[in-house]
Amino acid sequence: MSLLWVAGFLLWVRWAHGTEYWNASEVASVNDGGGGSSPLLVGLTLIQSAAAKHAVCLDGSLPGYHFHRGYGSGANSWIINLEGGGWCNDIKSCAFRKTGHHGSSYYMEKQIQFSGILSNKPEENPDFYNWNRVKIRYCDGGSFLGESYNEAAGLYFRGQRIWLAAMEELLSNGMRDASQALLSGCSAGGLSTIFHCDNFRALFSRSTNVKCLADAGLFLDSVDVAGGHTMRSFFGDVVSLQGAGKYLPRTCTARMDATSCFFPQNVVGNIQTPLFLLNTAYDVWQLQQSLAPKTADPQGYWKECKMNHANCNSYQLQFLQGFRDQMINAVKEFSSSGKNGLYINSCFAHCQSERQDT
């Protein structure tokens, strides 16, 4: 693997970033730590052509995106960011989800702030500030992969169709002629970036430089603090409910079950397109929701530790170090390829590329 890839994220960007509703991208505050100048607010565009394709949100509403057009040296470069926001794994949680912006465009903000890797300020985002920057809203609850419908509950699991409809619209808006294109995403969007990376590459001619960045998408098939498999059980329900198995990479499903293939550790080694993994070795979302959730820690032994690592005792720190080691081992084969890169840091955070303070 090239030293330029592992030296850090700033070097990499120079190549020109029970029933539960798990919201994986909103563990941290949504306030960004940028400067005092006015933030860039970008309007919502609904994909009108999606209706005929039945490419709709959980509630049947149209999907959408926010697009700020590039200029100058970035006029022919594109960065597509897939929004994160957890998953829903059963009818009850998905029915609840469709009453908010992660399940219905009726509740989506009409404008959102572009910060971090989507910022238009060269002092904040020197590599991508003048690119065509797009955030695709997440309203299917299955990492843009589902293909199913529950008539009784009125739930549309159309993540794969939303992905295709969004790509078709952006290609018609000029992305087809891109000289370089980067697919990125955070959390559930980072996971989707991994799954769709090669599909994204296939949209362009060979002359287009295409890469992918998965931020906080390295969800591990780990044992929780009670010795159970909280994350595997949850992902299994998501895959089954939403019919996501048919769109998972065949290089994985040909040798493993669909639930195993929803874990990126079993997928990244076979992705052909250059992929960069940005993740914290002590991911706070995974610590709070999959390693030490209330179901695995009913007595609250981990409560203080998972909210502030300064409160962890020696045993808990050892457990966290074991999780870090598992993450490093999970990407060993991936990191041996010169086309790939990764930056695994020791921050207690979740999602770093989209926030100005991280």
Image: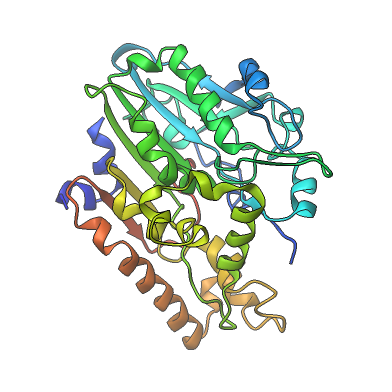
Whether 174 is drawn above or below 268: the answer is above
In the picture provided, is 51 more to the left or to the right than 17? right
Q: Residue furthest bottom?
A: 315
Q: Nearer the viewer, residue 185 or 252?
A: 252
Q: Residue at x 51, y 17 (%)?
A: 169
Q: Nearer the viewer, residue 52 or 326?
A: 52
Residue 9: x %, y % from top left = 30, 46
The answer to whether any part of residue 255 appears in the image is yes
Whether 50 is drawn above or below 141: the answer is above
Residue 207: x %, y % from top left = 22, 21
Q: Residue furthest front?
A: 254
In the picture provided, is 75 more to the left or to the right than 185? left
Whether 42 is drawn above or below 270: the answer is above
Q: Residue at x 56, y 61 (%)?
A: 285
Q: Residue at x 59, y 61 (%)?
A: 236
Residue 168: x %, y % from top left = 49, 20
In the picture provided, is 240 more to the left or to the right than 271? right
Residue 74: x %, y % from top left = 32, 18
Q: Nearer the viewer, residue 35 or 184?
A: 184
Looking at the image, what colour scheme do you see? rainbow
The answer to whether any part of residue 357 appears in the image is no
In the picture provided, is 57 more to the left or to the right than 170? right
Say how many tags the image has: 0
Q: Residue at x 35, y 38 (%)?
A: 198
